[in-house]
Amino acid sequence: MAEVYEVFPKAHRAAVTEIDAVDPSPALAIDARGKQVCRFDIALTGVALTLLTVAPIFWDEETESWITGEEHSFTAVGDYALLVDSSAGVLKLGWLFLKITAFTGTSFSFSADCLLS
C-alpha cells in the first residue's frame, strides 16, 4: 500500500552544527498526534565526517519527560530519508523531536524537514 504524506514538508531542524547536549523544550517538538509515520528528509554535510547518530525522542505528557527511540547512524555526508513509524516505536506518535546524539569528524551541518502521514 502506498504511503500518503502531507504535500509540503515542515522544517524541523536547520543548519545544526553541534550535538544536542541536553533534551529540548517540548515546544520545539513536532506535533505528530494522530499520525502513523513521520518521514524526516535529512541533508547532512561536513568535513571528515565518519559518524553522526540521531534518535527520535517522544514527549511523554504524563511523566513530563522524553523517551528515546531507536538510534540511527550516518557514516557519510549526503541526503537521506528516515522513517519513524509508530508501530515500531515505544509509543504512538505524539510530540516528536529528532535529537543528534553523537558525532565523529571535524565539522557537520544537519538539517531535517518532516512529513507526516
Image (cartoon, rainbow, N blue to C red):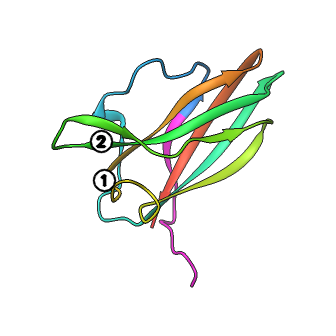
Q: Residues within 10 Å of mark 2 (few under 14, many from 20)?
A: many
- What secondary structure is found at the residue carrying circle 2? strand
- Please state, as top left, top right, bottom left or bottom right, where the C terminus lies in the image: bottom left
Residue on which the image places disc 2: 59
User: In front: 18, or 104?
Assistant: 104
Residue type of the residue flagged with mark 2:
Trp
Question: Would residue 96 be found to the left or right of residue 12 on screen?
Answer: left
Q: Are marks 1 and 2 in contact (CB under 8 Å)?
A: yes
Q: How many marks?
A: 2
- Where residue 91 sits in the image (x, y, percent)? 33, 55
User: In front: 5, or 39?
Assistant: 39
Per the rendering, the mark at residue 94 is: 1
Q: Residues within 10 Å of mark 1 (few under 14, many from 20)?
A: some
- Please state, as top left, top right, bottom left or bottom right, where the N terminus lies in the image: bottom right
Answer with the quarter of the image where residue 101 lies: top right
Answer with the quarter of the image where residue 77 lies: top right
How would you classify the magenta stretch by its main secondary structure?
loop
User: In front: 50, or 13?
Assistant: 50
| Residue positioned most to the left | 62
In this rendering, is residue 5 above or below 73? Answer: below
- Where residue 55 sits in the image (x, y, percent)? 52, 39
Residue at the image position 66 percent from the left and 23 percent from the top: 103
Dot 1 or dot 2: first in sequence order is 2
In this rendering, is residue 10 above or below 13? Answer: below
Residue range in magenta is: 1-13
Residue at the image position 71 percent from the left and 35 percent from the top: 44
Residue type of the residue flagged with mark 1:
Gly
- Where residue 15 sits in the image (x, y, percent)? 60, 28
- What secondary structure is found at the residue carrying circle 1? loop
Residue at the image position 29 percent from the left and 58 percent from the top: 33
Residue at the image position 45 percent from the left and 45 percent from the top: 69
